[in-house]
Image (spheres, rainbow, N blue to C red):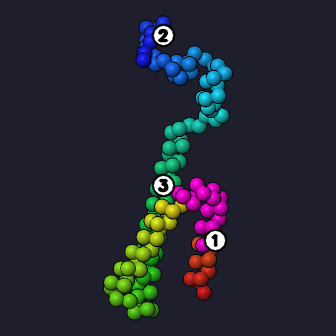
Amino acid sequence: MSTANGTGGYQRSGMRAAASQGPTEHNARLLPTRRCRLNHKLFLYFLVTVAAIGGGLFGYDTGVVSGAMLLISDEFGLSAWQHEVVVSCTIAMAAIGSLCSDSMNRLYGRRPVLLAASVVFVAGSVVLAV
């Protein structure tokens, strides 16, 4: 339901009307206060840059895997089909890991999940280096 607000315009009754009348005990509890003012355009550029770097790194990793697959195929004597399965599994595991990271972050928090991912990454690097 809309009512005239005395300035020629209309506003909705209820919480919006109470919020527009100034701070009261009721709406001060409900409305969050802004503690910091960020330049939203700068923040958007930062997010776009991080996403672009992430996409570039994913492409780089895919190139590294394809280069390593030449050596792996020769070492293990893989057929063309087995070669395709190994490459597809690396990309599929990346997709599954990204889907699972949301629930893991909600369950354990970001810091433990990042630490666990770092440990797995370092362990994999050590195993491949040996």
- Residue at x 53%, y 41% (from the top left corner): 42
Amino acid carrying mark 1 in the image: Val
Q: Whole-percent x and y of residue 25? A: 66, 21
Q: Are marks 1 and 2 in contact (CB under 8 Å)?
A: no
Residue at which label 1 appears = 119
Single out the mark in the foreground, 3 or 1. 1
| Residues drawn in magenta | 102-120
Q: Residue 108 in magenta? A: yes
Amino acid carrying mark 2 in the image: Asn
Q: Earlier in the sequence, mark 2 or mark 3?
A: 2
Residue at which label 2 appears = 5
| Residue 22 drawn above or below residue 49 | above
Front-most of residues 84 and 52: 84
Q: Whole-percent x and y of residue 59? A: 43, 66
Q: Are marks 2 and 3 in contact (CB under 8 Å)?
A: no
Single out the mark in the foreground, 2 or 3. 2
Give the CA distance from mark 3 to mark 1: 23 Å
